[in-house]
Amino acid sequence: MEGPGSASQGLPLTEQKLNVDQGGPALTKAASRLPIPGLRPKRPATGENEPPKQDWKRARMGPAPTKRASMSVATLRPKAPLAASVHRSQLVSGRCRSSSRAGVAIGAATTTVMTRRPVPVPAAPKPATTGGEEKKRAPWDLKGQVSDLRIKVGAYKEKTQRLAGENEALKQQLDGLEKELKHAMTENRELGSRASLLASELQVCQNQAEERRQEALELSAQKQQLEETLQSKTRVIGELEGVKREMVEANGDLATRLQTREAELRLAEESLAQRSQDNEMLRAQVAKQEQKLHELEMERRYLHNMVQELKGNIRVFCRVRPLLACEKEAQKGMGHLHFLPDNKSLALSKAEESHTGRERKDDITYEFNFDRVFPPPSSQEDVFEEIALLVQSALDGYHVCIFAYGQTGSGKTYTMEGPDEMSPDTAGMIPRAVQQIFKASREMETKGWKYNFTANFLEIYNESLRDLLVLRSEQSSELEIKRVLKLLQTAKAHRSVAKTMLNEHSSRSHSLFQLRIEGRNASQDLQTASVLSLVDLAGSERLDKSLSKGERLRETQAINSSLSNLGLVIMALSSKEAHVPYRNSKLTYLLQNSLGGNSKMLMFVNISPLEENFSESLNALRFARKVNECVIGTAQTNRK
């Protein structure tokens, strides 16, 4: 038996399960409050003689209404998703109307949730009461109380049966709702699929709309550009039309001017024809003048060569260097040297004493005559003026050889090359000769001559050839004779120089600069080939004065030997001997083409101003006089 107010706790299992599924607590059956037969209720100690008090509130209000676990269908069944109740007949879908429109119309789906009203449950009848209120029974009236309880039990049984019927009806209603829910969920899934499809179609349409919008923007920009271009072209057309009108207006003037110019052109053509005839005559005169100029040039070369031959094919110049600052303290003046006014004679004088030293004899004087004598004050330019014509002969096609001879320290290297720090005033014979050759060749270009130059700079050290235009580490022990185009300073830096007792910067080798000149005159069909040789010979030394030893001794012996062989070759040429010993030394073999009868030769004999070198100076002057007395024949030009 269930007590009043506990109807909700005795719900069927189905309703309790639904309540649990909906998230509510499980409804359990409460304990019964009915009196147990044979058990009397306890009375409080303070009221043993009083009758038991009844629950006046419960008697007055009647039994409490039965709690229901679910008063409506909404509390009994689970809530269905909104999308599950979408009615299929109310779905309206839209498609993209046109690709040219900026927007896309999409059909909207309208959903309707179908619900059922809960079945009304009749209210439970209240227990019958006598009068307006239930009669209270005395605590000792157990029979009456049992009767009242039986009446209540009957009422509860009826109520239970009625609730069972309602529960069955609710179960049936629940089954129907579940079926409707499944149907709605199926429709919801279908509608979800269609919604996804429509969403993808919507995205495609949106992408297409975006592309169309971009195309519209590009077309709009192109349209704007075309409009601007059209306006620009319109302005240009207007300007061109204005220019055209001006041109048309000016065309009349131009036609008139054209007629005038045509008349002038005819006159100019007539004048041109006359001038063409004059030009032909001038060309003929120019050809005659060029021929005459060529003849004069040949005559100049002939006369120039004749003058050089009259001077002698072997000429000797003598040059005496000035005293150095350190030498002026040890020697006062140059009393043993005498220069005659004709600039061609030089005299050496020396006082001789008796064997006993008590008597003084007259001075012994040695006179020498050369083609030119240069005293100490002479400059480099003064010396070159005398050999400039000889250098010109090399450009005319003659072999020319100029070399400097003398003892060590007499100024040969200074004469031929110049000092280490060279200036235009102190430049030696080699740079001045090269400069004159290049200058004269440029002047000859106006006469139809073209020249090609090849230069080489060698030294002969201990009878071996060395190329002065390469580094020492790059050259082999000996080199064959070859021609190299380089600068004079490079060669000078590589030349062999050493300190001896007679000279702190003594050249220990013969240096040889050769410039091969090849000329061609195409108009006259002439060719020339010549070699200009400029030689700085190493200084001769006396072993008793130089006190050379070891390597310096071998260098001195090689130098003196080559100088002796040079003298033998010159003597053989002057004596017109059948055999000339060119091969006795590398120096004479290298100068073979420049020492023969077909060449012009000039020798510088350099003299030291020191009186202590009197013997060496006298020997050098005697050798120079022998050279100056030689006659090697007439030089011939190398012309084709």
Image: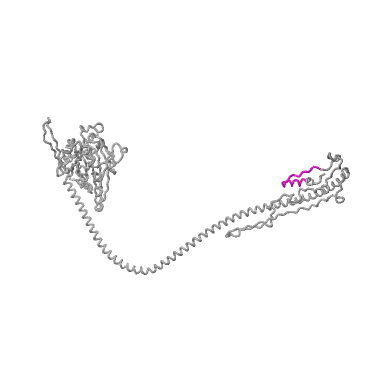
Residue 353: image quadrant is: top left
Residue 482 in view of the camera: yes
Q: Compared with residue 527, is residue 554 higher up or lower down, i.e. above or below? A: above
- The magenta stretch spans residue 23: yes
- Residue 83 belongs to magenta span: no
Place of residue 195 in the rendered image (x, y in percent of width and height, measured from the top left): 64, 54
Instruction: Please state the horizontal and vertical placement of residue 39, each as a whole percent of the image.
Output: 85, 39
- Where does the N terminus fall, quadrant-wise? top right
Tell me which colouring the rendered structure shows.
Answer: one colour
* Nearer to me, 575 or 452: 452
In this rendered view, identify the residue nearer to me: 448 or 624. 624
Q: Nearer the viewer, residue 337 or 98?
A: 337
Which sits in the foreground, 438 or 524?
Answer: 438
Residue 521 visible in this rendered orientation of the protein: no
Residue 213 lies, in percent from the top left, at 55, 58
| Residue positioned 49% across, 62% down in the render | 227
The vertical placement of 251 against 415, above or below, is below
Q: How many marks?
A: 0
Residue found farthest to the top: 356
Measuring from the top left, give residue 133's x and y in whole percent. Answer: 85, 50
Identify the magenta region.
Answer: 11-32
